[in-house]
Image (cartoon, rainbow, N blue to C red):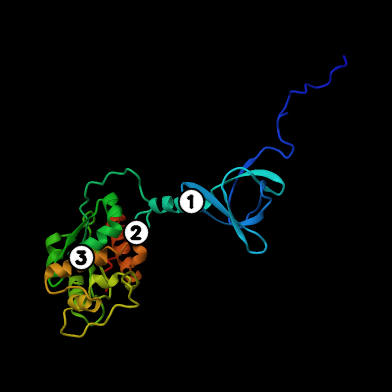
Amino acid sequence: MVDRYGTDVLSGDWKAPRRGRSEAVPATRGLVVEDVESGWVGAVARVEKAGGVHVVHLEDRKGRTRGFELGPGFWVDGRPVTLVPDTSGSDARLAEARQAASRTASGSVAVAGAPARVATGSRLFVEGRHDAELVEKVWGDDLRIEGVVVELLDGVDDLAAVIKDFAPDRDRRMGVLVDHLVPGTKEARIVEEARRVPGYSRFVKVLGHPYVDVWQSVRPERLGLQQWPVIPRGTSWKHGICAHLGWPHRSQADIARAWKQILGTVRTYADLEPTLLASVEELIDFVTVPLEDDQQEVVRA
C-alpha cells in the first residue's frame, strides 16, 4: 500500500540548526576557534579565571590576543562548539597521585586496609634511633605487613654478645644493619668476630653501608647540597654537618632537631643512597623469606 503523505515531517531532530548542535570541546592550548559574534579567529593561548568567570584568550595569526568568556558561541572547523576548561592536565596529575598512593614509601605495592601482622620472632636490629626512624619512614608499612619489629642496638661494640643473647634460629632470624661497615674499620673487625659465634651464624645476616652516619645515606640533593661535606678528624661528624649547614648544634636537642629536618626531606626510597637501599631490602628478605634446607650462612661486610 503506497504512503500518500510520505514520512513524518516531525520525526527526527527537526529543530537542529543547519550546522548541527553545539558540542562541548576542551579549550586545549593551540586549538583554533572562531568567535561567532565578532568573527575573531585565533588559537587558544591560555584559559584563566577572572571574577569567577573562565576567560579564553585567542591569539590570531598576527600575534594579537583577545579574551572571550568560555562557553557557547564558538566554531571549530565550521562546527558550533561550547568551549569548556581543559582538565586533561588535572586528570593526569590525579592519575599520578593515585598511582603514587598505591605504593608504599619503599616502592612496594600498598595493601589497602591490611592490619598489622602479629610480630614474628625475627628481628631487624639497627645501631641507633636515627637509623630506626629512617627505616620506619621508608619501610614501616612493609615491616608491619610482615610482622617484623625493629630493635635498637645502641652501637655494635658487643655484637657477638647480642647475637648470643638473642639466640636466633630458623624461625627467629636476626638481621643487623651496621653503620660505616668498610674494610679496615673497627666495625669490620666487630662483624668478623660476630661471624665466629658458633651455632647461630646461619640464622644471622649482617649488612651495612659505608657512611659515617645514617644521615649521610640521605641524598645530599634533598638538602640542597651537591655532596655531603668532609668533616675534619677530631670534630663530631653531626656537629660538623650542622655547622656547615648553618644550623644550631650546641646541644643534643639541636642535633635532634637537625635530624628531624633531614628526615623530613625523605619522601620515598628514591631519596636514599642505593647502598643503604640494597642492604635494608636484603635484610628484610632474609628475616621474612623461609629458609631453604640447604641455605648457607651469609654474613657480609
Q: Secondary structure at mark 3?
A: helix
Cα–Cα gap, marks 2 and 1:
39 Å
Question: Which residue sits at x=66%, y=46%?
Answer: 37
Residue that extends furthest to the bottom in the rendered view of this protein: 233
From the viewer's perspective, tell me whether residue 26 is left or right of residue 223. right
Q: Which residue in the protein does label 2 denote?
A: 106
Residue corresponding to mark 1? 49
Nearer-N-terminus badge (1/3)? 1
Density class for disc 1 (Cα within 10 Å; few <14, some 14-19, many ≥20) is few
Measured as percent of width and height from the top left, residue 263 is found at 26, 64
Residue assigned mark 3: 130
Q: Is residue 176 visible?
A: no
Q: Mark 2 is on which residue type?
A: Ser
- Depth check, front residue: 102 or 166: 102
> Looking at numbered disc 3 in the image, what kind of residue is underneath it?
His
Q: In the figure, residue 286 lies in which quadrant?
A: bottom left
Contact, CB < 8 Å: mark 2 with mark 1?
no
- Residue lying at the far top of the rendered structure: 1
